[in-house]
Image (cartoon, grey):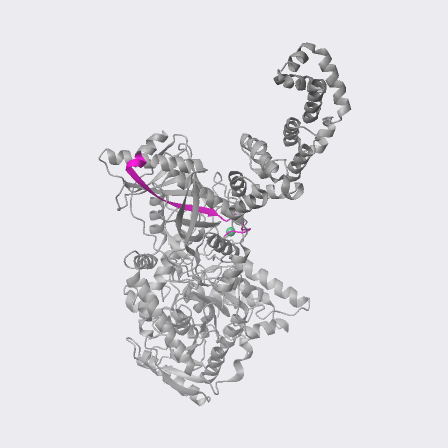
Amino acid sequence: MAKDRLAEVLARYEAVIGLEIHTEITASATKMFCGCPVAFGGEPNTRVCPVCLGLPGALPVPNQAAIEWTVLAGLATDCDIALASQFHRKQYFYPDMPKDYQISQYDLPFCSGGSLEIEVGDEGGYRTTVGITRIHLEEDTGKMVHVGGSEGRIAGATHSLVDFNRAGTPLMELVTEPDIRTPEEARCFARKLRSIWLALGISDCNMEEGSMRVDANVSIRPRGATELGVKSEVKNMNSFKALHDAVAYEIVRQADVLDGGGRVVQETRHWDAGARRTSGLRSKEEAHDYRYFPEPDMVPFAFDPEWVDSLACRLPELPDARRDRYIAAFGLPKHDAALLSAEYAQACFFEEAVEIAGADRAKQIANWMLGELAARLNADGAEIADTRIRPPMIAEIVALVEDGAISGKQAKDVFAEMAETGDAPGAIVEAAGMKQVSDTAAIEAVAAAVLEANPNEVASYRAGKSGLIGFFVGAVMREMRGQGNPQVVNDVLRRMLEG
Amino acid sequence: MSGIDLSVFPARQIRDAIASGEFSAREAADAAYERIDALDSDVHAFLQLTPELAYAAADRIDALRAAGEDLPSLAGVPAGIKDNMNLVGTRTTCASRILGDYESVYDCTAVRRLLDAGALPIGKCNMDEFAFGSSTENSAYGPTRNPWDLDRVPGGSSGGSAAVVAAGMASISLGSDTGGSIRQPGALTGTVGLKPTYGRVSRYGIVAFGSSLDQIGPFGRTVEDVALTLEAIAGEDAMDATSSPEPVERYSEALGIGAKGLRVGVVRDMLAAEGCGEEIRAVVDQAAETFAALGAEVGSVDLPNAKHGLAAYYIIGPAEASSNLARFDGIRYGHRAAEATDVLDLYMRSRAEGFGPESIRRIMLGTYALSAGYYDAYYGQAQKARTRIIEDFRAAFERFDILLTPTTPEVAFRFGEKVDDPYTMYLNDYYTIPVNLAGNCAVSVPSGLCTTTGMPMGLQIIGDYFAESTLLRAAAAFEEATGFDSVPPLVKALGVAKGGE
Ligand SMILES: [Zn+2]
């Protein structure tokens, strides 16, 4: 969809967007109400027990660690933490839900009334604050596999299979206020939230695998109107880009409906990343009555304020504070500092490398990480944890360059090899005989030979064509198979030509 | 023939007789199965017999004894288990078609503890479907008959568990009590039935009816058997978040203390209840006199909100049940309708075919009570009533150690008498329900036979939270003073072979 089409629509209409973000607490060793391990995938129905299969007579026992993670999430997003809280049963029939009710929270979520400030756009962007209505804890459902239809969808399927490995995984749901106005704000919010969850260590937040799932409630209204429009709920976005594109599509779609004199229908819509459009799910729109009531299998929670305080003490440095520290302590440009601090694993990598190389080389480390390393990860579609490159290797490569042992160009070759083999830069340099030659006498001998072989160019240079210096440097470097220290080569040549 | 009559041998004596080599655990199991052969075609107390499990357990006890090891507290004691408790190697049907072929894949904690104490699992006992009822007439597999009169109901929902003890087909049994389902059949069959304090016994592995009300508890012919069984099954369980860490007392050791000095409160206002017979009312007055004669301080107390118990219970119980029974949907286990067009159709057909009429009634009631727009008027109000009842009991226990009421408003009724009139059926639990709502412990103790019907009557003794020790001590004193003969004529007609005592 054309960007200007969205801009045109947003000039006439205001979009009102709220997000519902489900995050699996993958940091928890066990499921929410039983002892089964939390993990992705696996042979279907192998990580199950009477509790998470909803067998007759089985009872839920709450996972204290998951509750702590949720409270930490609330503390990190400025929420009020409820001292009296409770689980409720949310009741509806569906085959992926073994008990035919989901243990969730209703009017007493663990966290409510928070907010998060986001920065939209790079330099010259703006800041805005998004309210967080609540964060509550619930259990995830199993997974359905529909067989015989198209693309695993239910339509046309002949039968369905259920895998309960995921059933009962602790699932944190965050609901925002409808404070978001553009697809870009939605993307920024989700990104920022992910970076906080990662810093807290709550979840791996893998949108592809579904451990972080973002749904968007989207409505539009004419600019200046105060009454809210009819919303649709958009699901199935498994990347930040998909979130952005789906919300943008939905805004324009609704505008088209209204412009054509139609009426937006309240419905759930499915983002199809291939077709780049949303489509309504079989719209048998009956209002669900979930018949919530307090979960009688657990006693209500009464938390001690001191317990909440002790959790607050456990809060790690959050991305914004980290970014500010990178700027202050290492003099990084704001953009670089923001990029490095947003991803917790990347920040840890950076700090470990700086720890080894020294704070005065932090900028160079940042350059390598945001340059070569980022490009490499991008090309491989990999995470920083997946590569063979470790922080000490980056620290070493920076040291080799800074100490003049290898040239910047050589360093890039070393990096490429290091990424392939996982060997230490020093060993690669050694093995390739790549050590940079900085010995002035050796370079002088080569330079003298080059000048003697090119008398015309020497004459031109001395006549004022100083740009020919590059020609001489290149020739010397060729002779030295690239191992001459470029700075020394340069100095020697200038001295000999001008002397 | 084993020559052992379980109707006269209390559990303690069975264990001691096995320990001393008087007879073996296998012979104790024989005694149970012989009695079952003789009577259960008439009584129909068991849905499933489990001789493989019982004899395997008996062999372990006999091996322990042969090795000279100490025997556990219930070694070789034949036990019945209500069919809503899971035990690997058995079907757990809840007397419902929807779980007709359901095989347990794990053990209920209370059952596991009972068997760890050496009891022999004789079989799974009949009940009202999913424990909905007061007569066992709601069992999908036919009712259980009262051993005192085969034309009368044994009470319910744990009617099978009560009948197996009354008929000497087992020495003890486990039942579950959500609104009186242990105490009411206890009263109707002349057995002792205890509902422990909520949280005293783990609920893990019992198919839930009303999660905030359910408790597993024992039946026995004597208070001591009930105390021994409670000792075995009670205590905290990591698998049940509502189980209490309160330490388990040695209930059986406090029984001989007597009732002297106990503060006994007669719940006066509840005696005036609709449908409460003259003679039943007299039970309580006679019991008060008995306690006074034993040296207790007897007084009167009112529980003004207890009369709202029935109404509150028939909101909260069905509300929780409607939710707990949702999982029986034909997808993963249990009955699945043969022909269904889609998943919704599959749900509807499987459940309509699998559940009996009373289950459907309670699911409808509960679903309605929790629906948007009705929640506050029904569930919300019921919770308020529940809070008031809790306060009534709290106030009463500031003045008294135990409270007395009849267990039921009348003796066992005849089959079919109430089955078409749910309200008068529900009235049967008038005295027992407030205790489940408040969460206290209570026991029904036989108080004699009705002079017109010859049927047993029961006294309900109610105790404070986790005051089972005081409760059982009072019950034992009353039992001793009353001298009730717990053997029904049907059993006497078999001829008593070899007893204890
Ligand atoms: Zn599990």
Residue occupying image coordinates x 40% and y 32%: A150
Q: Where in the figure is residue A384, as x and y percent of width and height?
A: 58, 38
Q: Is residue B424 above or below residue A148?
A: below
Viewer-proximal residue among A269 and B281: A269
Q: State the image coordinates of residue A93 (x, y, percent, origin top left).
A: 37, 49
User: x and y percent of residue B420 in the render?
Assistant: 28, 63
Give above or below for B344 relative to B8: above
Determine whether A34 is above or below B257 in the image: above
Q: Quadrant of the N terminus of chain A?
A: top left
Q: Is residue B401 visible?
A: yes
B467 left or right of A442? left
In this rendering, the answer to whether B64 lies above or below A189 is below
**Corner quadrant of residue A388:** top right
The residues colored magenta run A9-31
The one of A498 and A358 positioned closer to us in this rendering: A498
Residue furthest out toward the top: A456
Q: Which residue occupies the foreground of this view, B377 or A174?
A: A174
| Residue that appears at 33% across and 31% down | A5
